[in-house]
Image (cartoon, helix red, strand yellow):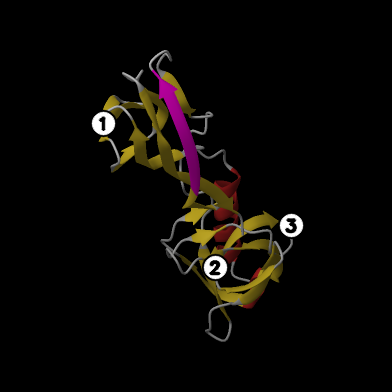
Amino acid sequence: MPNWMMDRLKEIDTVNQQAMNPFECQTAVPFMLVGRDGTPFTVFGFSRGCFFKSRFFTVHSIHGGELCVVLEVLAPCDCNGHLFRTKAKVVVNSNRFCGLTLVDVPVFDYLQVSYVVTDQLCLPFMLCKKDVPKTIYRLDGKEQLHAETVSVHYTGTDPQVELTLYTKEKSIRLQVPKDEFRSLTVCQLQSIEIATPVDVVKGMIELQLHFCEKKKLYF
């Protein structure tokens, strides 16, 4: 076995074992191996219940003075061209390869995906002139709330109903004339308050809530 092959694998193992900055994206040194027949070494990996095909690896461990090396099989992601670490391992004899090529592709521990979840609420309301301003909706602490559409249907004896929409950044006044409909989309809504009427106000507030959620996918 050429000494340079094992020396190169040991160098990669040393880098992989070093304490990495937790804010850095690169968590391993990826490479490809070339077999004695001149073709890239390719395997089918199995990780977290799924099979995948890959020709990208990094060093997991090296057995002392032996020629055997435990490689971690990296999973390629077609959606972004990145590589991801997996639970799949393969033991190889380094003497069976004649070439090693480092690849300039980022390696990540997981893929973080974001998606929007939509929910709807219907809030009937009724206030008379003796009532104090009433908070009809208040956020329950979900920080992932992204955007909200507030639709107001108003009927009552007052010429209009006045609402105040409180967001993280500001307050917005919304006035809806009698027997009319108004709709407004805001970001990071915290609460909705209805002002004390002159006589009676009643109607329906429809909320369309858009939650931004994130999920970590491990390969």
Q: Position of residue 38 (x, y in %)?
A: 52, 84
Closer mark to the observer between disc 3 and disc 1:
1
Q: Earlier in the sequence, mark 3 or mark 1?
A: 3
The residue at the point 57 percent across, 86 percent down is 37
Residue 63 marker = 3
Q: Secondary structure at mark 2?
A: loop
Mark 3 and mark 1 in contact? Answer it, CB < 8 Å. no
The CA distance from mark 3 to mark 2 is: 21 Å
Residue type of the residue flagged with mark 1: Gln
24 in relation to 200, above or below: below
149 in relation to 39, above or below: above
Determine the image quadrant of residue 171: top left
Residue type of the residue flagged with mark 3: His
The residue at the point 53 percent across, 83 percent down is 39
Residue under label 1, please give it.
175
- Give the residues in magenta: 119-128
112 in relation to 5, above or below: above
The residue at the point 35 percent across, 39 percent down is 152
Q: Is residue 134 left or right of residue 165?
A: right
Furthest-bottom residue in this view? 37
Q: Position of residue 114 (x, y in %)?
A: 47, 51
Q: Position of residue 5 (x, y in %)?
A: 57, 65
Q: Quadrant of the C terminus?
A: bottom right
Q: Earlier in the sequence, mark 3 or mark 2?
A: 2
Q: Position of residue 51 (x, y in %)?
A: 66, 72
Residue under label 2, please give it.
56
The image shows a total of numbered marks equal to 3
- Residue nearer the viewer, 142 or 138: 138
The CA distance from mark 3 to mark 1 is: 74 Å
Residue 195 marker = none
Determine the image quadrant of residue 203: top left
